[in-house]
């Protein structure tokens, strides 16, 4: 028998030339590993979003037209198609990244967008009384892009605990969240601050934060919201309107009247009347336009579609063995699902009004690309080799699903099927 090669001191093994994969082969590998079901659900929701924006576009175009500048009824629809094309390119390109590259790019973008967030109070462009945009020829909202990459960055910081349990990872992410929240409230932007707080809380909950600390954080959050009510006039007016019932001219009340106007089956595409008086019909209140023109049944289907996307990602994370991937996927899912359901609850008059778009459906530039970036990161993190079967300690252990399985089997088992 041939004796195995044993490297000796002072000698180096002959380097093996690496084989460079062709673009076609890389594309085939990506198609095998990516979650095609999740990708198709997202694309289907974007197609429906294009139809919904085309229905809402005449109302917003008429409302924003002036005597000297008359907007085409399909102005927002045509622009939305362009933004969706850019968003799909960003989503597909991001989904082709490895987990390591997705993490590196997210950390770099977090630093850049955090710096841009510092510049917003100084160089920001003001719209409707809020200074949230930066205009360098192309206007963009740094907080929109900061949300997904910050979720990945926080997940990476929390995963340091595996290397050294003494690192105060929860405190580090708390400091990062505090800085971001302070900068957001200077704009002011309470809606995004709540979203950041939501996915940060989900991350530290999964990371194993002590129950006592979680209780303290919840108490501090309630105290800060109370202080916001007294210090932030816009938030106080919206909360008072929500609990006081408002008037017939409030945005939330108009949205509820619009969503109920179509009944179960809707008034028909392009036949809605209530939408013509609804502000931001193509963005914040597009769910109400869907209700009026397509009916409450279609609204239920849209809600189920969001639930299906969230459930699909969580099922992929059930047996995830990488703590970073588990945290990043959970944080991104909390961000996506939280934004969608806050928007829907606002339209149903179950939540105070927030300037928040409906992901994948509402019209938007920065918001559309940022949501597609979120989905792209989710696809990159949940990619799996289809020939690799795992039974590992992951999210299933956190919720107790693996207790019975662990009694009769090894806690870690990996089978490679040909």
Image: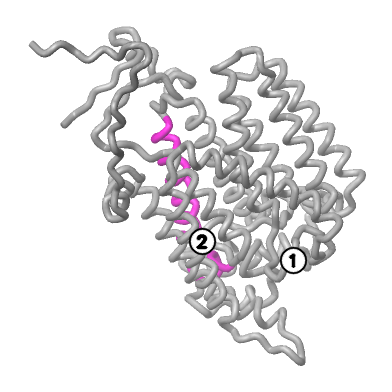
Label drawn at residue 87: 2
State yes or no: discs 1 and 2 in contact (Cβ < 8 Å).
Answer: no
- Residue 359, x across and y down, in percent: 56, 56
Mark 2 crowd level (few <14, some 14–19, many ≥20, 10 Å Cα): many
Separation of residues labelled 1 and 2 (CA atoms): 20 Å
| Residue furthest out toward the top | 407
- Part of the protein shown in magenta: 289-317
Q: Is residue 35 left or right of residue 79?
A: left
- Residue 150, x across and y down, in percent: 63, 41
Above-or-below relation of 92 to 126: above
Which secondary structure dominates the residues rendered in magenta?
helix
| Residue furthest out toward the right | 231
| Residue furthest out toward the left | 1
Q: Is residue 292 magenta?
A: yes
Q: Is residue 69 visible?
A: yes
Above-or-below relation of 24 to 277: above
Query: What is the secondary structure assignment of the residue under circle 1?
Result: strand
Q: Which residue is mark 1?
A: 135
- Residue 101, x across and y down, in percent: 49, 41
What residue do we see at 56% from left, 59% from top? 369
- Residue 3, x across and y down, in percent: 15, 11
Q: Depth-wise, is mark 1 or mark 2 nearer the camera?
A: 1
Query: What is the secondary structure assignment of the residue under circle 2?
Result: helix
Q: Is residue 243 left or right of residue 389?
A: right
What residue do we see at 75% from left, 61% from top? 133
Q: Is residue 404 visible?
A: no
Label drawn at residue 230: none
Which callout, 1 or 2, points at the residue further toward the start of the chain?
2
Q: Nearer the viewer, residue 77 or 379?
A: 379
């Amino acid at each position: 028998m041939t004796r195995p090669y044993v490297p000796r001191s002072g000698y180096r093994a002959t380097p093996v030339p690496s084989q460079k994969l062709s673009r076609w082969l890389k594309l085939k590998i990506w198609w095998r590993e990516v979650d095609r079901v999740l990708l198709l659900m997202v694309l289907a929701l974007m197609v429906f979003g294009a139809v919904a924006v085309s229905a809402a576009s005449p109302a917003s175009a008429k409302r924003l037209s002036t005597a000297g500048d008359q907007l085409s009824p399909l102005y927002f629809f045509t622009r939305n198609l362009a933004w969706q094309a850019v968003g799909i390119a960003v989503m597909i390109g991001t989904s082709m990244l490895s987990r390591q590259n997705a993490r590196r790019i997210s950390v770099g973008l977090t630093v850049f967008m955090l710096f841009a967030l510092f510049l917003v109070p100084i160089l920001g462009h003001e719209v409707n009384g809020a200074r949230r945009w930066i205009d360098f020829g192309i206007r963009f909202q740094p907080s929109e892009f900061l949300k997904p990459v910050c979720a990945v960055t926080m997940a990476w910081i929390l995963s340091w605990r595996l290397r050294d349990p003494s690192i105060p990872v929860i405190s580090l992410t708390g400091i990062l969240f505090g800085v971001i929240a302070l900068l957001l409230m200077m704009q002011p932007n309470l809606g995004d601050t709540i979203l950041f707080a939501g996915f940060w809380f989900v991350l530290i909950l999964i990371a194993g934060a002590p129950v006592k600390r979680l209780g303290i954080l919840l108490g501090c959050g309630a105290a800060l919201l109370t202080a916001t009510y007294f210090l932030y006039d816009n938030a106080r007016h919206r909360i008072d309107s929500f609990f006081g019932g408002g008037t017939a001219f409030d945005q939330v009340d108009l949205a509820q009247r619009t969503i109920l106007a179509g009944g179960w089956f809707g008034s028909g595409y392009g036949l809605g009347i209530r939408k013509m008086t609804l502000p931001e019909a193509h963005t914040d209140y597009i769910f109400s336009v869907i209700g009026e023109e397509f009916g409450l049944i279609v609204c239920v289907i849209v809600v189920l579609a969001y639930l299906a996307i969230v459930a699909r990602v969580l099922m992929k994370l059930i047996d995830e063995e990488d703590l970073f991937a588990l945290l990043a996927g959970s944080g991104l899912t909390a961000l996506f699902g939280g934004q969608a359901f806050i928007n829907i609850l606002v339209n149903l008059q179950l939540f105070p009004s927030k300037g928040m778009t409906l992901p994948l459906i509402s019209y938007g530039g920065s918001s559309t690309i940022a949501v597609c970036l979120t989905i792209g990161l989710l696809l990159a993190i949940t990619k799996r080799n289809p020939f690799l079967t795992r039974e590992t300690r992951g999210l299933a252990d956190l919720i107790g699903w693996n207790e019975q399985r662990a009694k009769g089997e090894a806690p870690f088992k990996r089978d490679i099927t040909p």
